[in-house]
Image (cartoon, rainbow, N blue to C red):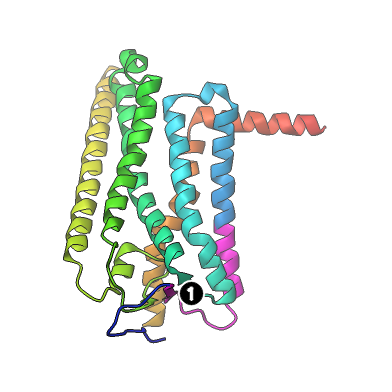
Amino acid sequence: MENVTTLTPLKQPIVFELEGFHIPPGYGSFLFFLALLNYIVVLLGNGVVVCVIVIDKNLHRPMFVMVCNLVVCDLLGATTVLPRLMMHFLTGERRIAYIPAIAQAFSVHTYGVAVQTILAAMAYDRYIAVCEPLRYHAIMTSARLHCCCALAWFVAVLCIAVLFGFHMNVPLCGNIIKHVYCSNRAILSLACRSTPTNNIYGLSMTWSVSTGIFVIIAFSYFRILRASVKQGGDSGVRTSKNVKKFFSILFIIMPPAINPVIYGLVSKELRSSIIKHFINQISLKK
């Protein structure tokens, strides 16, 4: 598969071709089944968490509202990549039109930033709950909760919207995306000219967001740990290429499957609510 490179820019409609995985003969169906199984786990796990939180009014509290936002973010990331990946495994389809490619890249990057900003909002909520328990309800009001959630999404969408704004009027001279899915860097690597502004902004934005979120989360959990300790004192080749590509999508396909367990089922209240609704459903059938 050779990259189609021309001296003149490609004209719309542009159709990209993803490099994808090298799939040995006869393994396509098996890989499709694994991807489908992962997607089903994502949908069921996150779906159960959302349904229980929505149904049980006792869970209509800031922490669980933020968990719902994290679930939506996870579904965005998984749905952006897995369905097309399944089609690639099953049919070998690699082509993707320009608009769907931009949409996929935008969604992937939005997921990457939003999951960090939402976790930062959750860390802030836990910080207030542990370090200011008596003032928690006065501080974390409904308005502030919705503000935190909206700000988390707004920061993510704004950062990525500016990033993709640099795609405007950038001519492309190639159509082979050397990755499993579309991304900002993969698309702009096909540009007819260098894109230093996009590169500088992308690196600066990634560093700023990651560092800022890390500082917020680290500070919050340091204060939480400090408060807990204080309370405790008072009371206690192709194969290698495929491996690299697999790890590159691991951060998209695994967290949506694991997060419902980490942030949902580990919660005693949420776990009890799920069990209660499950038992009620069995009793109704009898």
Q: Which residue is mark 1?
A: 95
* Magenta highlight on residue 22: yes
Viewer-proximal residue, 101 or 12? Answer: 12
Residue 214, position in %: x, y?
24, 43
Q: Residue 63 or 192: which is nearer the viewer?
A: 192
Identify the residue at horizontal 32%, vertical 45% (top origin): 156
Query: How many other residues sit within 10 Å of disc 1, few (<14), some (14-19) or many (≥20)?
Result: some
Using the image, determine if residue 150 lies above or below residue 42. Answer: above
Against 285, residue 10 (above or below) is below
Disc count in the image?
1
* Quarter occupied by the C terminus: top right
Direction from residue 191 to residue 20 in the image, left or right: right
What amino acid is found at the position of numbered circle 1 in the picture? Arg
Residue at 37% over, 22% down = 143
- Label 1 sits on a secondary structure element that is strand
What residue sits 49% from the left and 75% below the top? 94
Q: Residue 30, position in %: x, y?
A: 59, 71
x%, y% of residue 79?
51, 55
Task: Report whether 143 appears left or right of 201.
Answer: right
Q: Is residue 31 left or right of residue 219?
A: right
Taking 128 as reference, is 163 above or below it?
below
Of residues 232 and 22, the one drawn nearer to the viewer in this rendering: 22
Q: Residue at x 60, y 33 (%)?
A: 274
Which residues fall within the magenta stretch? 13-38
Q: Residue 122, can we see it? A: no
Where is residue 102, by image quadrant? bottom left
